[in-house]
Image (tube, rainbow, N blue to C red):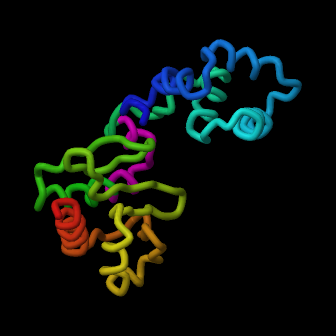
Amino acid sequence: MATRGGERSAHFPRIEKKYGKPVAFWLKQLASLPSDKYADHMEFLRERHGFSREHANALIMFNRGSTSSKRHADPKQYLSTLDAKKVKTVKAIFKAVQTKYPKLELVMAWNQPMLTTGTAYVIGVSVSKNHITLNPFSKAVMDEFRTKLAAYDPLKHTFKVPVDWKVDVGLLQRLAKARLAEITK
């Protein structure tokens, strides 16, 4: 697993060990390909050389000058990219959960803000143009709350709320409680 910092180079020691050649060799191979399309580079590494998607992506993106997958330094910086209505809703979502569970830590993972306990995710959000997606990181929790989430377009692992959602504090706290109970089993 890569480092929490999102540095693509964190994959390099495992790439060298698993595929038997130095990273410089693979970067040279990518540079010599006739196409510079991502899909062609991915196919070259995965189909011809057996790379995992994660390792291939790390090399391809590093080769393109993207040394880190990290887009936001912290939740505050992430929120600074949103309009005021979305910021208000996201803050209210996290406040609702952290009021009852103050030891949960707000972190960035997969370029999205999430509440964690140790290394386990409790709830995260992803902001889109027309809605906010919430993820309790558990299909079992989603299944348990599916009828209560019916108004929020529940999917397998997530549900959507409007960007100007009047936050249902009780619902979010019950979701967090169920997820925490699952984590501590």
Q: Residue at x 36, y 51 (%)?
A: 87
Dominant secondary structure (helix, strand or loop) of the stretch shown in magenta: helix
Horizontal relation, residue 97 to residue 78: left or right: left
Q: x and y percent of residue 71 in the render?
A: 47, 34
In the displayed orientation, state which residue is furthest to the right. Answer: 34
Q: How many marks?
A: 0
* Magenta span: 77-89
Residue occupying image coordinates x 20% and y 45%: 118
Q: Along the line of sight, which residue is nearer the eye, 157 or 163? A: 157
Q: Quadrant of the C terminus?
A: bottom left
Q: Is residue 37 above or below residue 109?
A: above
> Going by the image, does 138 lie left or right of 22?
left
Hey, which quadrant is residue 49 in on the image? top right
What residue occupies the far bottom of the structure in this picture? Answer: 147
Given residues 169 and 87, the one toward you in this image is 169
Residue 79 appears in the picture as rendered:
yes
